[in-house]
Image (tube, rainbow, N blue to C red):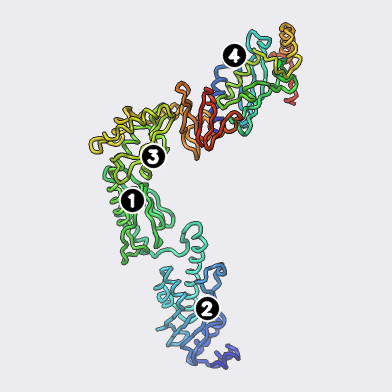
Amino acid sequence: MQTKRLLHERKELAQEAAKGAAASGFILEPEGDSMSRFRGYLCGPPDTPFAGGRFRVLVTLPPAYPMSPPEVRFRTPVFHPNVHFRTGEVCLDVLKAAWSPAWSLASCMRALLVLLACPEPSSPLNCDAGNLLRCGDERGYRSMARMYVRRYALPDAKDETTEADR
Amino acid sequence: MQGALTDGRLHNTSAIPDTLQASAVVHRLVARFPHVLPQNRSLTEYRGWIALHTAGVTQASECLTAEVVVQVRCPCGPADMQGADVQVDAHTRALLEQCALGDVLPARTAYATDLVEMLEQVSDLVERCRAGRVANVAASATSPSWTRALPRPEYYKRLLHDLERIGWEHVVRIDDAFAELELQVPDAAGRQHLVILRDWHTPAPSIHASLPAHVPLPEPDRSSVQPHGISLMQAVAQVRAVLGAYQPLFQVLDDVDQHSCVLEPERPTYATCIRRIALGRHCSLYIEVDPHNPRSVPVCRLLGGERDTAALQERLNGGLHQWDAVGRTPRQNLEAILECSFPPAPTAADRLHGSSTEGDECGICYSYRMEGVGVPDMACDYAPCARPYHRSCLWEWLQALPETRQSFQVCFGVCPYCSRPIRVRR
């Protein structure tokens, strides 16, 4: 049952890519001939500390997809309470318990964009970022995040990758 | 005689030199067929058996004996086969008959110039037959191809003659052995029907056509050269007769196929009287036409979300008495009763762009027709959502959720899209 769905999703992703990264906010492409691995990047949403950054992601589909959610990892270090700084793991409800087959890869990418804009400090994977926000140090969080974006995520930043990448 | 045999055959034969020629033949006989022995001093009668060496004989069935018992009478001696007569045992005779070679034996032995050559002919013929049988026994498990023992030339002559009478333009395909023929037979309304004649060179042929029922074999004519006694002309006439009887059915099915969007079968043929017609809004109508009375009320079943089908079901139940079997086709009757017109079949361009079934795909697997499952057969009951699903996909999804309640064969959960209650029966 996966095949048809994956073809459909690839088509949808190709349509998003055709719109351009600026319009859709993300690019996700199949990795080589693989049907279950996708690579791409998210564009940091404007008016957030992540604006202007490109955050590379790796999406792996489990064999049970779409009955179980895709596994998404950032491959660019992100300073965000719901993203593990070293592994790139993401804590997002729709990629965990709230998953439903109604979500597609494209909609997951959009959910990640929203997550970047609206961090959820109550369930942090990155305690430093979470603590800053929980203590109300919005400015501290923003400047830390901005610093890491400058260091890793700007198009001309030196290409340092997360642990998952190595 | 018996005493001479125990001493050794060479001694025996050289002791009775009729003529020089005869003794030379007997020498060769002893070398080639040591089990065939002269039965009298004048060397005019022989008896014994010929051992056969066909490969695979050991696995062959019990009716294939390993040797042929022969009895030869040659009144003019072993070197002159004039008036000679050869008899084989009943098993071998039956085998030759089966391979349609019963009358070949005397014909072939008549050309022999001496006894040894005659026995060679017998041995060769029987071995050929047995090889054909062995090959056939081995092949019958998979495909009944009869490679070695081909039918008589008359069979092919007659077949070609028949094909010429039918017209070569109607022949679609003939296999190498002239055993399987595909013909295109037009019916009275000009529809072309593909007819396949299988195993035509065997005594048990069959006629296949894309029709709701099997085409019976015509009455065989025993005097025919065909192994089954059915000429090609008879077979085609039989198919034409059957096609004629199904004309009303073809009209009804054509009407449905041309004026509505048939979801199932994917490629409608006349072989099945079942059609699933799209009604729009994820509803469909399953009908089963009676092949013998096609204009009568078919078996009808509405499929789709309960909200949408309920109203249609009511109309269907209430309107069946208006069925007009004479003035309207079943499709027109159904359209009138359901008070809707069936959406037309998508064109090739629609199919290419996938817009025909866009929105009708299962919300879980994103496919429309799934192997072994069919097309989405249920939908969310909440009208603004109305997302269609394959029963099996939704079952698989709901069953894996901890918040789903299951009672007997029904799962109660929420729609993956709108999160409103949904239930699915296994």
Q: Looking at this view, is B18 or B131 the one in front? A: B131
Question: For numbered disc 2, what is the local secondary structure?
Answer: strand
Left or right: residue A82 compared with residue B141: right
Mark 2–mark 1 Cα distance, whole angstroms, equals 48 Å
Question: For numbered disc 4, what is the local secondary structure?
Answer: helix
Q: How many residues crowd mark 3 within 10 Å: few (<14), some (14–19), many (20+)?
A: some
Residue B82 locus on image (x, y percent): 41, 83
Q: State which mark lies toward you, 4 or 3.
A: 3
Residue A138 locus on image (x, y percent): 71, 7
Residue assigned mark 4? A22
Residue type at mark 4 is Ala
Residue assigned mark 2? B50
Quick one: quadrant of the N terminus of chain B? bottom right
> The disc numbered 2 marks a residue on which chain?
B
Q: Looking at this view, is B385 or B59 the one in front? A: B385
Q: First in sequence, mark 2 or 1: give its number.
A: 2
Q: How many residues crowd mark 1 within 10 Å: few (<14), some (14–19), many (20+)?
A: few
Residue assigned mark 1? B168
Residue type at mark 1 is Trp
Residue type at mark 3 is Pro
Q: Looking at this view, is B236 or B395 the one in front? A: B395
Residue assigned mark 3? B268
Question: For numbered disc 1, what is the local secondary structure?
Answer: helix
Residue type at mark 2 is Ile
Residue at image point 35% right, 58% down: B159
